[in-house]
Image (tube, helix red, strand yellow):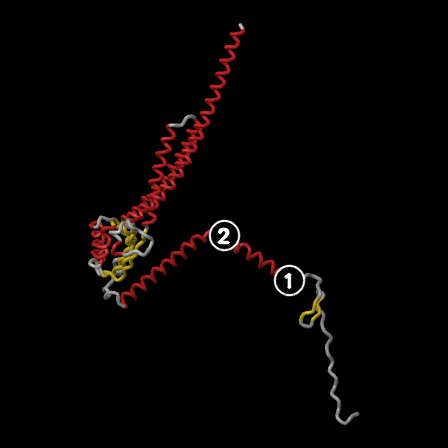
Amino acid sequence: MKHGWDKLRLLAAGLAMAVLFTGCGAGSGSDNMASSMSATSSAAMEETGEMAMDTLAANDLDTGAVDPETMENSGRKIIYTAYAAMETENYDETSAAVRQMVDEAGGYISSSSARGNRADGSRSVDYTCKIPAENYSSFIDGLSGAGNLYRLSESTDDVTIQYVDLDARLRSLENQLERLEALAEEAADIDTLLTIETKIGDVQYELESYTAQMRTLENQIAYSTIDLTIDEVGAVSEGTGFGSRLRAAFGDGWDGFVSAVQGIAVAVVTMLPWLVVLAVLLAVLIPVIRRRKKRAGRPAPGSTGRQSGVWQTGEAVKEPEKTEQPPEKNGQN
């Protein structure tokens, strides 16, 4: 009987030791998983910097001045924008020609705004054209053939550094996501799995945000933006002389005047309800104020006062009449 109790005690002790070692193993596994996640994040950050530097070195890029002649061949990411103003005696033909040029260049018109009327020959239209970057130069050169191009301004924005940074971040996040998914498959307990899934959600959110930024940037790089104004005139001016500049200045002044008038009209309409309420209040208060002023100007019964040499005590009192004395005769003492 005694030997039986000894066996039971040994069995219980063995079970206790097994449970203890199992707990220690689980805790060690969690610590190893946390260390792996920390290492994954640190490696991702280092990898982002290395990718960006490698990309810049491979394309021989720096942050110095941009040479327009070598932009296309240097691997740089350039956003082209331009503003052009044209005048024409054949408004319909010029507008149709510009639209055809946009189609032939593989672009599209993202917005347009027309004004004026045919009767007095004052029509004009504003186009916002999106042209593929590779056809930007040819499209600009072809505008002079559609009408009298009297104003042209161009600008470029070098977004190479921004593009490289976004690209490196995206690649780093994708690698980090793959590592986290691999760790999730190896998770030994629920707590560790939930921690990894939370981290995966954060990485996916950042990945989607940077992906949206990259798509917007790539679209701006791929399609140049050209704002074009076409004005109908009775006779086109010559080149960029005084007449063209005077016409352009008048057009800008007129546009500013119209914008100001529209702003004032919008402000008046916005304030109209308040003005109506104020007018009603004034219509009610002004008669009341006038009646009070009239009552305040009347003398109270029994009041005394002197006005124009007359004492008033409720009834007018006559002033004593002055008696004239006869003049003294000369020679009398």
- Residue picked out by circle 2: 277
Dot 2: what SS? helix
Q: Residue at x 36, y 42 (%)?
A: 48
Q: Nearest the camera: 136 or 3?
A: 3
Q: Would residue 144 be found to the left or right of residue 37 on screen?
A: left
- Classify the position of the C terminus by image quarter: bottom right
The residue at the far right in this view is 333
- Amino acid type, label 1: Arg
Q: How many marks?
A: 2
**Residue 187, which numbered label?**
none
Q: Would residue 174 be found to the left or right of residue 30 on screen?
A: left
Relative to 250, say whether 7 is above or below: above
- Amino acid type, label 2: Val
In x, y percent, where is residue 326? 74, 86
In x, y percent, where is residue 161? 33, 49
* Residue 178 appears in view: yes
The residue at the far bottom in this view is 331
In x, y percent, where is residue 162? 34, 48
Residue 299, by quadrant, is bottom right
- Cα distance between the residues tagged 1 and 2: 33 Å
Q: Nearest the camera: 146 or 165?
A: 165
* Residue 126 appears in view: no
Dot 1: what SS? loop
Choose the circle earlier in sequence order: 1 or 2: 2
- Residue picked out by circle 1: 298
Relative to 201, say whether 10 is above or below: above
